Amino acid sequence: MRYHADPMSLFFDALDSLKSVETPLRRWVLPDRFHRVEIETNSRCNRGCHYCPVAVDPRPGHQMSEALFLSIVDQLAAMGFRGRLSPHFFGEPLLDPRLPHLMAEARKRLPKARIVIYTNGDALTPQKAHALLDAGVSLFVVTFESAESEAFQKTRASLPWWTFRRHFLVRHFQDDVKAPFNRGGTVLFGAKELHMSSCHAPSSTLVVDAWGKLKLCPNDYYGVEDWGDLGTTKLVDLWDQPAFRATRRELLRGEFKKEICRTCVGKVPVTRPLADHG
């Protein structure tokens, strides 16, 4: 078996580890271009984690067509994309049986990208882990609400320790996520909740849901601020919409003109949360 190390993505790894300086870099230095892409291939999730709106108001089950997924990936390839690609939004990616095939196609088209799977770990069996590593996945970020799943424990045991250390990041939400987002005002965490004076998420991360809709950011669960349909419009045309560009610049300057943004960063109180853990 061969596992991809993606040595060409060191810059993007470094930027991910320096998120505290990303906003000023994006405001004053970096071009207006995303370096993280999240394409949700499956909208369904098998869990109801307390920190996610899926627990209270799950969305309908839907799979993005392979043709649309590959069309988006090909558009990224034409742009020379070499950042982080992840097949998720609020759905659990490992519930999509096509995932190894889709990731292999993404790797073929985006040889310098860093493919990262975010998962709750329930379905991360040894067979799936090996298939996805062979397909070119760079890293699994596994977040547990409580105890580790049996499937994941078997996967850990099936891999050499150096392979596991290199390709798996394990987080336990209560211990490792110190300041969570309120997910656009859908889930509250009281004093623990993240507050921000500016926001680079819409500038750094392009998010597409399973229906092909371009989201404002990874926290816009209900699509309050959708920016178009990639099934009918090219990615670059949606990204370069004057109103979307202006919104990204405003958020980098700390100008929160949209209600969902003011709520998400703690500028105004949440009035109708789905869940309150304060």
Image: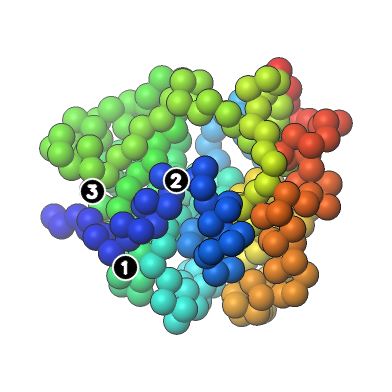
Identify the residue position indicated by label 1 in the image: 112
Q: Residue at x 22, y 56 (%)?
A: 5
**In front here: 122 or 145?**
145
Q: Quadrant of residue 229?
A: bottom right
Name the residue furthest front: 28
- Badge 3 vs badge 2, beta-carbon distance below 8 Å: no
Q: CA distance from mark 3 to mark 2?
A: 30 Å
- Is residue 60 visible from the viewing direction of this image? no
Left or right of 194: which side holds 256? right
Q: Say whether disc 2 or disc 1 marks the residue closer to the N-terminus.
A: 2
Identify the residue position indicated by label 3 in the image: 130
Mark seen at residue 18: 2
| Image position of 159 with respect to 93: above or below | above
Identity, as a three-letter code, of the amino acid under mark 1: Lys
Q: Quadrant of the N terminus?
A: bottom left
User: Where does the image place residue 251, in percent across and percent down from the top left?
Assistant: 71, 54
Q: Nearer the viewer, mark 2 or mark 1?
A: 2
Q: CA distance from mark 2 to mark 1?
A: 21 Å
Q: How many marks?
A: 3
**Residue density around tag 1, few if under 14, some if 14–19, many if 20 or more, within 10 Å:** many
**In front here: 217 or 140?**
217
